[in-house]
Amino acid sequence: MEYSNFHVMRTAEWIPIKICRIIKTFKYSLWVFTSICYDLLRRLRQIRREIMIQLVMSLVISRIDYCNSVLVGLAASTLTPLQRVHNAAARLILRLSRSHITPALKQLYWLAIKFCITFKVATLMYNIFCQHSPSYLKDLVAFSPSAHQHQLRSSTTRSAVVHRTRTQLSRCTFSVSGPYVWNSLPTHIRLIDSQPAFRRALKTHLFNIAFN
């Protein structure tokens, strides 16, 4: 019994240390990633504009968007390096100097990084609701009992079950952040039955929040 208590105490002592190491490793990975993106953007400045735009989208923006749902719940300071790369790509495409970035993002119809993450998480939740996701994602979230009763479509909000958590780190997990993001959407967007229509309405909604 004493050994068991000692083992639990030692494990509890190591948890904060392990979390700090994970965070440091994650931040270092972001630093390496952003360094690669900056190097690509510098090289792309020398290319003809039409081709350069295509390469920026395929080599930089697509990398930022890839699996960005894992960044949900992170502090704004952690996402700042990615946002700076995003801004640099926008300035390169529009041939801008160090001007204010908001008009450039609005002109390109680009969402800021935090809204891109929200868009990705909400889309994953929509796919889960429509049974278009793998089981390892579907097992992480649950919807309210009436959410799948299409005959009662007018009386349901298609809300997800939100799990309570006490730690900031737990809020970064998809099982917590996914339902939270989903329930934060307006009901009329959650009730859309077509995925293309849902994505269009979702981006318009986030765009209005970001720039209005």
Image: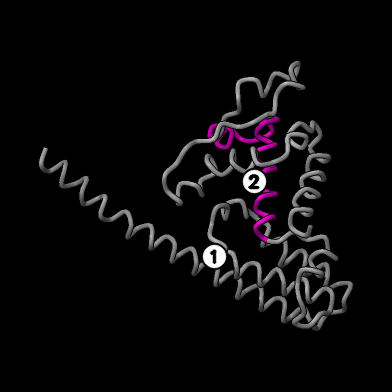
Mark 1 element type: helix
Seen in the picture, residue 107 relative to 136 is either above or below; the reply is below
Q: Quadrant of the C terminus?
A: bottom right
Q: Would you name the residue on which mark 2 appears?
A: 121
Q: Which mark is residue 113?
A: none
Q: Which residue is drawn at 57% across and 37% down?
A: 137
Q: Which residue is drawn at 70% across and 76% down?
A: 40
Quadrant hosting residue 133: top right
Q: Residue at x 89, y 72 (%)?
A: 50
Quadrant hosting residue 115: bottom right
Left or right of 91 on screen, residue 72: left
Q: Position of residue 17 (x, y in %)?
A: 32, 60
**How many other residues sit within 10 Å of disc 2, few (<14), some (14-19) or many (≥20)?**
many
Q: In which quarter of the image is the N terminus?
A: top left
Left or right of 179 on screen, residue 1: left
Q: Is residue 115 magenta?
A: yes
Seen in the picture, residue 66 relative to 78 is either above or below; the reply is above
Q: Which mark is residue 78?
A: 1
Q: Which secondary structure is most common in the magenta stretch?
A: helix
Is tag 1's residue or tag 2's residue first in the polypeptide sequence? 1
Q: Is residue 178 magenta?
A: no
Q: Position of residue 122 (x, y in %)?
A: 67, 43
Relative depth, front residue between 177 and 195: 177
Q: Where is residue 178 in the image (x, y as percent from the top left)?
A: 59, 41
The number of discs equals: 2
Left or right of 29 on screen, residue 68: right
The amino acid pointed to by label 2 is Val
Relative depth, front residue between 46 and 142: 142
Q: What residue range appears in magenta? A: 113-140
Q: Position of residue 197 (x, y in %)?
A: 83, 39
The amino acid pointed to by label 1 is Thr
